[in-house]
Amino acid sequence: MAESETSGAAGAAPGSAANMIEVRGLRKSFGGREVLKGIDLCMKAGTTNVILGGSGSGKTVLMKHLIGLLQPDAGEVLIEGESIGRLSGRELARVRHKFGMVFQAAALFDSMTVFDNVAFPLREHTKKKESEIARIVHEKLDIVGLRDIDERFPAELSGGMRKRVGLARAIALEPKIVLYDEPTTGLDPITTDYVDEMILAAKKQLGVTSVVISHDIGSAMNIADHIAFLFEGQICEQGGPTDLRNSTHPAVSRFMATWLGKR
Ligand SMILES: Nc1ncnc2c1ncn2[C@@H]1O[C@H](COP(=O)(O)OP(=O)(O)OP(=O)(O)O)[C@@H](O)[C@H]1O
Ligand SMILES: [Mg+2]
């Protein structure tokens, strides 16, 4: 990828209307221990943004702030320019409708078929007819590369397939933003590639802004327009894949070295 392309994706200016998500000066402590020590981050609409970092570095805590599940001690989160810190419950629910979430363990409803899992948000939040719901369910399953598994139950699927059903459900209502917590952790390399492809397909076909929390650097290099590396409560490096590869920050180069060693 051309250098200008990667650096172009490396965050619009703060305050820019092109930002789907903006984090400003975010700090968060638990029991006197500061986990996030001033995070500033911009994610442009329609881009795939990976937040990388070691275990316990605060990735999930940061993600929870993006949908208002946690409140910052200082700083703020803006979604499409709107600060979500002081919103009422109803206003926050409106903002959350902009998000789809793919949880770490896929979190499908075990007693429901694949079809019903993907149809669930449509039945819950819209008044669409069953014929229209079926059309949307199949369209979304198609995006994640799954066909003819409507009547199967989650227990009958592989881990990778479950993740893909999880994504189909997350995009059923066509959210502007999709959050993924560790989408490839615990998957074999081939399945990891499938999941990466599905994240790219969601971006290409639906134009979603993706936020991917990960410690899988290989996957990050494949899918990211922009990577932010979280270390000791701060973003110690950010930019396109090339910028991360060339980073001289010790924590980043250590991460990079383990990945290069495996290839
Ligand atoms: N609700 C909470 N109360 C107290 N401490 C918390 C809470 N949530 C997170 N922490 C602490 O914050 C730190 C960061 O946690 P977080 O879950 O964000 O890590 P992570 O980067 O997602 O790690 P992993 O890669 O293992 O998922 C950890 O030390 C964790 O114990
Ligand atoms: Mg986590």
Image (cartoon, rainbow, N blue to C red):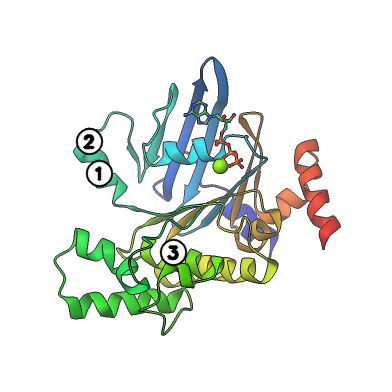
Q: Amino acid at mark 3?
A: Leu
Left or right: 150 with respect to 182? left
Q: Nearer the viewer, residue 104 or 158?
A: 158
Q: CA distance from mark 3 to mark 2?
A: 26 Å
Secondary element type, mark 2: helix
Q: Amino acid at mark 1?
A: Ala
Secondary element type, mark 1: helix
- Residue identifier under label 1: 93
Answer whether labels 1 and 2 touch (C-beta < 8 Å).
yes
Q: Is residue 44 above or below residue 75?
A: below
Q: Is residue 219 above or below residue 251?
A: below
Q: Amino acid at mark 2?
A: Gly
- Residue identifier under label 3: 167
Answer whether labels 1 and 3 touch (C-beta < 8 Å).
no
Q: Nearer the viewer, residue 20 or 184?
A: 184
Locate residue 222, reporting x and y percent.
Answer: 65, 63
The answer to whether residue 209 is seen in the rendering is yes
Image quarter for ligand 2: top right
Locate residue 34, reporting x and y percent.
Answer: 56, 21
Q: Nearer the viewer, residue 139 or 55?
A: 55
- Residue identifier under label 2: 89
